[in-house]
């Protein structure tokens, strides 16, 4: 809606009644509607009035269906979802309207740079709770973005706004504009499947869309800038970026768990997205710095989710996949070397191979200084599940023996435990590998002290295995 149309409608409607609501001052307008402060007896509200010309252009039946969807939420309340008070059409004025509760606050996009890092988790958890509430009502929001999220001035509460493109799930015959299957939403914050109208019309399919859009909002909260802000024009370029560009989040000071959650949400493939993300992940608070027990619980929770939705590794014959495996192998070796140096572990040798997995074995010899009179080995297997989306899985095994020659080779099957799966997050993985190395050294010291080391390898149970 341009300014001329908005000014004309404001002049026409201010001070008039619409559906029994007395319209006061105009408090804003968007692409398709004006919003008025209004009252009906003692009840105050915000009335959204839709542009007649746009309604005519796209069809009254489609607009009536949208309004009825919003009206279905009257009486259904959630603390983080804008309350719908009324909706309908006024034949005498030829206007459709929706009445919402007044929420006098700025939207998220206006205050991104001001939101403290320690409020990010609570805010995204609240928005996710509202989206999940809609899902439980068999509705998809379809346009979750910073401009559609209100935030109180103390950053304690977020409210999901603008329910204008709500869609009931599982009604594939529904179209949005005169029978056409067109894109509805905001391209910048929409996943590829929604852009190309290839989304699955099911609870799972729309959940994947919500996860992606929540990931976009979380990206903005962490990076303090809009998603794809450097790629908005020209439009065909943005289409290409949304379809293919992998998001890398630079957010110093942000919790690693939140950054990893955002990256998992922004995976292009919806099936992968659903395997990596659950509603529960939005509720889980980040571990506090130095809280090893909390870190282990986060790691264990990620492993339980990964085990429930285990993804087979792709056969990766292409150049991209081979390069990704080689790079991941080098990254793992660097992480372990850094961890050993920082934590003062015994000297070690590294064994690698050229398999489709990023496999390494770190063999630590006896060390009087470290109170270990046996050899222990840590096996790390890194799989690149999706090179394009940077999705990886890491398994780790560890054994202690008196006879180094008894240790199995990299190619020999041996005991390993899944310790990471998802979009690659090097800081999280490095932390996990450091914890494992310290655990293995402690276990090796204990076995040596109790004379519990044999010539055959004694396999250790990696912490967090459940």
Image (cartoon, rainbow, N blue to C red):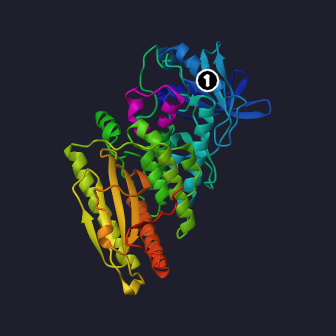
Q: Which residues are magenta?
A: 188-209
Residue 185 in sight:
yes
As rendered, which of 359 and 230 lies closer to the eye? 359
As rendered, which of 421 and 283 lies closer to the eye? 421
- The location of residue 187, given as percent across then percent down, is 40, 35
Q: Residue at x 37, y 42 (%)?
A: 312
- The location of residue 424, given as percent across then percent down, is 37, 53
Q: How many marks?
A: 1
- The location of residue 390, given as percent across then percent down, is 34, 49
**What residue occupies the far left of the structure in this picture?**
319
90 sits to left or right of 50: right
As rendered, which of 216 and 385 lies closer to the eye? 385
The verdict on residue 214 being magenta is no
As rendered, which of 325 and 291 lies closer to the eye? 325
| SS assignment at label 1 | helix
The verdict on residue 193 being magenta is yes
**What residue occupies the far front of the structure in this picture?**
455
Indicate whether 416 appears above or below 274: below
Q: Residue at x 45, y 13 (%)?
A: 179
Q: Residue at x 57, y 63 (%)?
A: 294
Indicate whether 11 appears above or below 313: above
Which residue corresponds to mark 1? 69
Indicate whether 75 appears above or below 88: below
């Amino acid at each position: 809606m341009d300014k001329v149309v908005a000014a004309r409608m404001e002049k026409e409607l201010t001070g008039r009644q619409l559906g029994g609501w007395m319209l006061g001052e105009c408090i804003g307008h968007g692409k398709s509607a004006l919003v008025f402060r209004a009252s009906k007896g003692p009840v105050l509200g915000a009335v959204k009035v839709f542009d007649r010309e746009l309604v005519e252009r796209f069809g009254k039946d489609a607009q009536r269906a949208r309004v009825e969807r919003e009206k279905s939420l009257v009486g259904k309340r959630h603390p983080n979802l804008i309350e719908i008070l009324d909706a309908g059409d006024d034949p005498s004025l030829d206007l459709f309207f929706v009445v919402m509760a007044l929420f006098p606050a700025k939207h998220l996009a206006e205050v991104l740079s001001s939101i403290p890092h320690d409020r990010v988790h609570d805010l995204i958890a609240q928005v996710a709770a509202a989206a999940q509430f809609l899902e439980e009502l068999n509705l998809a929001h379809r346009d979750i973005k910073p401009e559609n999220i209100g935030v109180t001035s103390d950053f304690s509460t977020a409210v999901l706004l603008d329910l204008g493109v709500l869609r009931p799930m599982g009604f594939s015959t529904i179209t949005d504009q005169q029978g056409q299957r067109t894109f509805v939403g905001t391209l910048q914050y929409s996943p590829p499947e929604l852009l190309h109208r290839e989304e699955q019309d099911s609870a799972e399919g729309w959940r994947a869309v919500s996860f992606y859009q929540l990931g976009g909002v979380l990206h903005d909260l962490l990076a303090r800038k809009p998603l794809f802000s450097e790629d908005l024009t020209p439009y065909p370029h943005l289409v290409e970026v949304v379809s293919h560009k992998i998001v890398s989040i630079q957010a110093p000071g942000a919790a690693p768990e939140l950054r990893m959650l955002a990256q998992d949400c922004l995976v292009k493939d919806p099936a992968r997205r659903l395997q990596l993300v659950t509603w529960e992940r939005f509720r889980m608070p980040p571990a506090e710095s130095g809280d090893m027990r909390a870190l282990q619980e986060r790691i264990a929770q990620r492993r339980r989710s990964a085990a429930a939705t285990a993804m087979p590794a792709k056969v990766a014959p292409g150049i991209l996949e081979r390069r990704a495996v080689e790079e991941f192998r080098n990254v793992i070796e660097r992480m372990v070397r850094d961890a050993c140096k920082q934590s003062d572990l015994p000297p070690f040798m590294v064994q690698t191979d050229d398999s489709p997995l990023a496999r390494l074995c770190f063999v630590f010899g006896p060390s009087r200084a470290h109170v270990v009179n046996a050899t222990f080995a840590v096996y790390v297997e890194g799989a690149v599940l999706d090179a394009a989306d940077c999705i990886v899985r890491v398994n780790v095994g560890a054994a202690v023996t008196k006879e180094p020659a008894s240790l199995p080779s990299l190619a020999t099957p041996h005991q390993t435990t899944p310790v990471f799966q998802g979009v690659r997050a090097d800081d999280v993985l490095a932390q996990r590998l450091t914890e494992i190395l310290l655990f293995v050294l402690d276990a090796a010291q204990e076995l040596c002290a109790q004379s519990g080391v044999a010539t055959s390898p004694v396999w250790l149970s990696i912490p967090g295995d459940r």
